[in-house]
Amino acid sequence: MWLLTKLFAHVDQPKPRFAFQGTVNWMRGLAISVEDGFSHQQLREFYRDTQRRQSNEQGDALAFECLTMSVHNVSAIESMKAIDDPYAIVRSAIVAWYYATYYAAKAMLAARSGADPQTHAAAGKVWQSEIVDSRLVKAPFDLSVIDITPSNVRQVMDTLRAGNMTDLNAEPVDEYMAYGALCSYLKGTADYERWRLEEKVKSGREYKQGGFTSFRSKAAKDLRDAKLKPAHVNYLVQAFRYRGEANYRDAIYLSYGRDESERLRQFVTDLAAVAGAFSLMAAHYSARRVVRNDWAEFVADLQEHGEFEWPFDLSEI
């Protein structure tokens, strides 16, 4: 493989096998985990105690706008499932999955408090404080780690795993393996975020002035941990990392090498299922928060003027 040899000679590349498996197996794990828990009835039950908020016209308008964007992206992935050659559309499907996720999260934030974070990083931070910490997100999308110092991540992961040591190297075939895969990606993302913040600390003035060359000394570790302790990893942070890996660093392994057409067809199906579950969850939550009669008006308007096929029936909410 000439191209792969060329890249390994000049660029720091991840291992091809793990890059592909990590990409498809995390989504397979998520798809298995949402399969039996995101019906209209189950979501109505999950949000039964959610109170309608005081009128916030601007926040409601933003929620409706973001929901439309989210549902449209889910519809896009659903349409891609009919394409016989998954290689032609797999990266586009990942992008649609990400924006279905991102805009669904934005809709929930708008419905929750009217918040409108302007960057992906800011959205992940507000999502943690307003949605995850308030237990307004349904499993498996609730998994998170706050304080990504190495010792705390180990402790949190030990608690979450409870002995389940399945990782992303194995394709999940049941809920137990799926959960292990989700824990594996959460841990990997926490490690990545720690590395990213450590690199920022190393390039900072205090680290350089201290003459540090590692984080072994207490002073250097304290400097590092001041950045790591308030940091967090949640589903949105994972989604942002995933989009970047699958479309930039790892993209060659979704278009090159051994023919994995069958697994990629399943992958596109999984992307649609996971994005659809997350988007439907956001729709149910938003419907409980916006002005009561406006939800029916929103659905009726989309029925009349929407130019894309709904991936699920909003009128049942």
Image (spheres, rainbow, N blue to C red):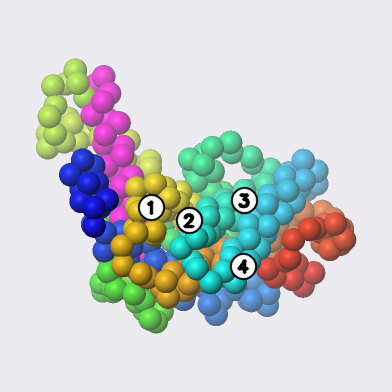
Q: Choose the circle earlier in sequence order: 2 or 1.
A: 2
> Which of the marked residues, 3 or 2, is nearer the chain's N terminus?
2
**Residue of label 4:** 78
Residue type at numbered disc 2? Arg
Closer to the camera in the image, 317 or 255 = 255
Q: Amino acid at mark 3?
A: Tyr
Q: CA distance from mark 3 to mark 2?
A: 18 Å
Residue 22 rendering spot, x and y as whole percentages: 33, 62
Q: Are marks 4 and 3 in contact (CB under 8 Å)?
A: no
Does residue 218 appear in the picture of this structure? no
Graded by Cα atoms within 10 Å as few (under 14), some (14 to 19) or many (20 or more), the crowding at tag 3 reads many
**Residue that badge 2 annotates:** 91
Question: Do the residues bearing badges 2 and 4 touch, measured as CB atoms within 8 Å?
Answer: no
Could you tell which of marks 3 and 1 lies nearer the N-terminus?
3
Query: Helix, strand or loop at disc 3?
Result: helix
For disc 2, the neighbor class at 10 Å (few under 14, some 14 to 19, many from 20) is some
Q: Is residue 205 magenta?
A: yes
The residue singled out by tag 1 in the image is 251
* Magenta region: 181-206
Q: Residue 101 placed where, x, y %?
A: 56, 55
The quadrant where residue 296 appears: bottom right
Q: Tell me which amino acid carries mark 1.
A: Ala
Q: Quote the CA–CA distance across marks 2 and 1.
A: 8 Å
Q: Position of residue 312 (x, y in %)?
A: 70, 70
